[in-house]
Image: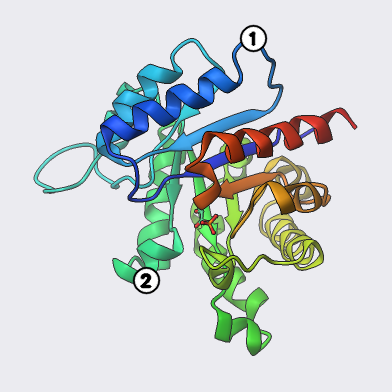
Amino acid sequence: MRKTLIAGNWKMNAGPTEAKVLADEMVAKWEGKEFSQEALICPPFVSLPFVVKSFRDTFFKAGAQNVYTENNGAYTGEISVSMLKELTCEYVILGHSERREYFNETDDFIAKKVRKVLNEGMKPILCVGEKFDQRQQGDQKAVVQKQLSNILSLVNESHAENFVVAYEPVWAIGTGETATPEQAQEMHQFIRSFISNKWSDEAADKVRILYGGSMKPANAEELLSQNDVDGGLIGGASLKADSFSEIMSIAEKLSKN
Ligand code: 13P
């Protein structure tokens, strides 16, 4: 059984002071309570050590929003996998649509990062998803297939358990628009069957596929109930302890059904 992953992407929000307060609030909400699934928060790099500290001795995990392909050296402004491991991070978000759009990240570059992260024993959360006009044209599956294709050739299926995909339709990010549960399930199922064709059924069965795009307490239950939706990558609603915890509670409840 795949464990549900409820992941927060804080994007460029919450500097060290605010991040610490918010992380402490989340921990306080779950004080004395059990969470059998996985909860992850990915703050900005400068806030990461503070969030790691707040989460120490709790089930909450802290992860990163990006990483570079080299271990160290003259790469001004970059952060390496070993640096993240030193902070005890397990997860790193890669290929987010905002990085593709504003920082010109290509499928090739993202594939190299995914390979590096997996080879170093960390877990990438690879973001894929179509833009509004691409969906209008009915191209959503072709777009996502192209985003996944290189990576699945570069990476060995033995990494399946550590490989996480986030389907994030760009038109649903930060817009309040959400994919319907049926649209999400259709894309998640497509992604899993594409992985199964490239790798194998057993490997595809181990890969977790998260949904991202305006997930909030009001729509989380129907999205997370879908067969191939194994969690959420949550932006706006992860910046409030209340709403993030509520989504976690929904995941916990569904895991008991
Ligand atoms: P929102 O939840 O704010 O739509 O953001 C989704 C996202 O981009 C998570 O990576």
In the displayed structure, does residue 47 sit left or right of residue 61?
left
Colour basis: rainbow
Which callout, 2 or 1, points to the residue nearer the camera?
1
**The N terminus lies in quadrant:** top right
In the displayed structure, does residue 64 sit left or right of residue 4?
left
Q: Is mark 2 within 8 Å of ligand 1?
A: no
Up-down: is 252 above or below 167? above
Q: Is mark 1 within 8 Å of ligand 1?
A: no
Label annotation for residue 52: none
10 Å neighbourhood of mark 1: few (<14), some, or many (≥20)?
few
The percent position of residue 207, horizontal first and vertical second, equals 67, 44
The percent position of residue 12, horizontal first and vertical second, equals 33, 50
| Residue bearing mark 1 | 32
Up-down: is 21 above or below 162? above
Q: Amino acid at mark 1?
A: Gly
In the displayed structure, does residue 151 sit left or right of residue 232?
left
Give the quadrant of residue 4.
top right
Residue shown at 47%/39% (left/top)? Answer: 118
Label annotation for residue 101: 2
The percent position of residue 124, horizontal first and vertical second, equals 48, 43
Residue pushed farthest bottom? 137
Q: Amino acid at mark 2?
A: Glu
Say if residue 132 shows up in the picture: yes
Q: CA distance from mark 2 to mark 1?
A: 42 Å
Up-down: is 60 above or below 165? above
Q: Secondary structure at mark 2?
A: helix
Query: Looking at the image, do the residues carrying marks 2 and 1 touch, with CB atoms under 8 Å apart?
Result: no
Residue shown at 72%/65% (left/top)? Answer: 187
133 and 144: which is toward the camera: 133
The percent position of residue 175, horizontal first and vertical second, equals 54, 68
